Image (cartoon, coloured by chain):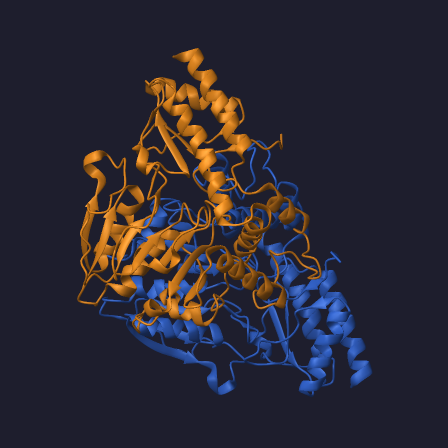
Chain colours: A orange, B blue
Amino acid sequence: MNQRVFNFSPGPATLPLPVLQEVQQNLLALPGAGASILEISHRSKTFEQIIAQAEANIRQLLNLPDEYHVLFLQGGASLQFSQVPMTFLRGSGRSADYMVTGSWAKRALAEAQREGGVRVIWDGKENNYSRVPKKGEYDVNPDAVYVHFTSNETIQGIQFPAEPETGDVPLVCDASSDFLSRPIDVKRYGLIYAGAQKNVGPAGVTIVIIRNDLLERVPDGLPTMLDYRVHAENHSLYNTPPVFAIYVVMLVTRWLLESIGGLEQMHAINQQKAQMLYDAIDRSEGFYRGHAQPDSRSLMNVTWRLPTEELEAQFVKEAKEAGLHELKGHRSVGGIRASIYNAMPIEGVRTLVEFMEDFRRRHA
Amino acid sequence: MNQRVFNFSPGPATLPLPVLQEVQQNLLALPGAGASILEISHRSKTFEQIIAQAEANIRQLLNLPDEYHVLFLQGGASLQFSQVPMTFLRGSGRSADYMVTGSWAKRALAEAQREGGVRVIWDGKENNYSRVPKKGEYDVNPDAVYVHFTSNETIQGIQFPAEPETGDVPLVCDASSDFLSRPIDVKRYGLIYAGAQKNVGPAGVTIVIIRNDLLERVPDGLPTMLDYRVHAENHSLYNTPPVFAIYVVMLVTRWLLESIGGLEQMHAINQQKAQMLYDAIDRSEGFYRGHAQPDSRSLMNVTWRLPTEELEAQFVKEAKEAGLHELKGHRSVGGIRASIYNAMPIEGVRTLVEFMEDFRRRHA
C-alpha cells in the first residue's frame, strides 16, 4: 500500500527520497529541540539557524552577490503576479514589457494589466505557444520599468535556453518551474520569484530574490505584507513564515549541494533525463509528437501527443498500472506531460522510456 | 536527544501527538497514493478528499450554516489585516469600527487605516491592555461597514469571554489564537480569520470563514489572489494551496472531533488547564502577579510577572531545565507566558504548576 511510485506530477512534485526520510525521522522532535518542526517557534534559535541555512544554500547554489536579498514568502507565484506590478508599475507613469510564452505568462500579464501600462513585446499565440522568442524577435522599450518573462512554461513544456536580452532594463522572472535546476546568469536579473513546489520543496513557500536597486524603488503605502522591504529588513520573519516548507527547502538545497554537487551537475542530469524522453519521441516515427519546437524544449516538462485522444487515455491508464503516475497533460492542452524536475531519478525516466517503447509496439 | 518536552510556545505551538505520529507514519507515501503528502498534486483525488474533509470537519465543529464559506489561504492573519479593509472599506465611503485590545488589534488597526476611514470604539491603553471591553463601554456606529475585534490577545493574555454586541453590523474577528478552542455563536460573525499555527495546525495556512452577504460585497478589480470570491468559487484551489498544512489541519480537526469529542469538550479541558494556572497565581501571595484582569483572563495564553526581572529569567532558565520550554513572555511586555492551546496536555500544565510552586518555595 505504501510503496512509492514514479510521480511525474507537474507540481507539487516528487522530492528527493533522502530529504523525505530525514523529515520523517525527525518529525516528532528535531534533534536537540524537544519538539517537532511543526511546533517550534519561528523566533527560536533552532529555526533561525534553519532559515539562515536555507538562504545560505540558495546563495551558494546561485553564486548570489550580496546586493541580492533572498525572501521566503507566501501566496505562490500567483500573488507575485500582482505584487510585482503593484510595487513597480502602479503609479510609476511608465510601462512594463511582458513576453507571453504560454499559460503562466498570460496569468502574469493579466494581473499586471490591472496595475498599470503593459506592452506585450512577444506573443507565441500564432505558433500555439510551441517556442520561446529568439533574440531579435522582440524590442525592449529602454524606458520600461522591467521586462517580465516566464523561464519555463509547465503546461506547454517550453523553456528559455538562456535569458532574453534586455539591455539595462531589469529582468523580472517567474522561475517557478525551473528554479535551481540549472546555473543562471543571476546578475542579469532584478527580481526572480518561484513557488517552491517543483524543484525545491513542498507547496507553501515562495522564494523571491530581489536586487537592492529594485528594493529601493518600493513605494510607501503598500499593505505591509506586500512590501518587499519589510520582508527584507525582517529576514522573512515579519510575521510567522511557513516554517515547515522553509525547513524542507533547506534540506532540498543541502541535497543539491552535497549529494548532487551544485547546479552544473544538476543541469547535466536534467539534460540527460530530458534527452532520453525527447529521443524516445523523435525515434517513434510520428507515433509520439512533441509539442515544443526543438530549440525551446523544456528540460522540466516534456509534452507530447499520441495519434488519438483514446490512445492518450489508454497511455495514461496503462502507465499508472505500471507505476508511472500523473502523466496526463494539463486539461487546457490535453496530451501527455512528464514532469521531470530535479528530484525525478534517471531510473524513473528510463522506466517511462521503456514503457513508451512497449506501448508503441503494442499500439502503433 | 529526541525526547519531547512540554512546549509552551505561543505559536507555532504544540500539536496532538497522535497527529504527529500519523504524519510521520505516512510521510514517505500516503496510503494508496504512492507518494508523500509533500509531493502529491493539489488537483489529485487524494488531496481533493483531504481538503474536503478538512472543510467538513471545521463545518461540523462550528456547526457552520451553509451560507458560510471556508477558505484555506496563505499570508497569515497579517495579510488579512489588509485584505479585509482593502475589500470592504477602501472606496466604500463608509468607516469601520475597531476595538483595540492589545498588540494584535493594533496591527490590524494600522493596516485598516491605510485603506480607509476607521473609528476606534474602544482602546485598552489606559489599563495597559489588561482587559477587554464590557458591554456598554463602546458605541458601535450602526453605519459601520464592520466591527473588528481580536478574540484573544496572545501577548497580553486577555480574551473576550463572548462576542461583543454589534447589532446588525457584521462582526469581523481575528481568531488566530483561539480558533476552534471553544464553541462560538457563529451566526454573529460576518468574517473570521485565523492563522492555523496555534490550535489547528502548523504555520503556513490561514483559515477564513466568510458569510455570503459579505462575499457579495467584494468589489471588482482587486488582485486575483486577494479576491475572496475567487477562492470561494475555486474551493481554495485557484492556485497551489499549502497542501501539507491543510493536511495537518484535517488531522487536527479530526482529532478534535474523534478524540476530544468537539468544541464543548475542548472548551471544558481548556478551562480546566487555565484554571490550574490562574489558581497557582492566585494562591502565590503576590509572588506571581497575573497581567490580565480576572474577567478577561485568556484560556490560551496565561501571562504573569515575578517580583524581579532577574527572578523571571531564573524561572525561564530553570523551567527549561525541567523540560518546560518557551515560557518567556513576549519581548514587548516581558514576564512569563504559558501558552496552553488545545493540544497542550493537562499533564504539561500540572508539571508547570508543580514547578511554579517549587520555584516559589525556593525563591519567595
Above or below, B194 against B58 in this view is below
Task: Kindly tell me whether residue A299 is visible in this rendering.
Answer: yes
Residue located at (70% from left, 57% from top) = A31
Residue B44 appears in the rendering: no
Quadrant in the picture for residue A277? top left
Residue visible at 35% across and 55% down?
A79
- Give residue A130's position: percent from left, percent from top: 27, 35
**Which of B183 and A208 lies nearest the eye of the viewer?**
A208
Quadrant of residue A83 within the rendered picture: bottom left
User: Could you say which quadrant of the image residue B116 lies in?
Assistant: bottom left
Between residues A232 and A297, which one lies in front from this camera angle? A297
**Measured from the top left, where is residue A45 in percent x and y?**
62, 68
- Considering the image in quadrants, where does the N terminus of chain A appear? top right
Q: Position of residue B265 (x, y in %)?
A: 63, 55
* B5 vs B35, nearest the viewer: B35
Above or below for B238 versus B356: above
The residue shown at (37%, 69%) is: A212
Foreground pick, A176 / A91: A176
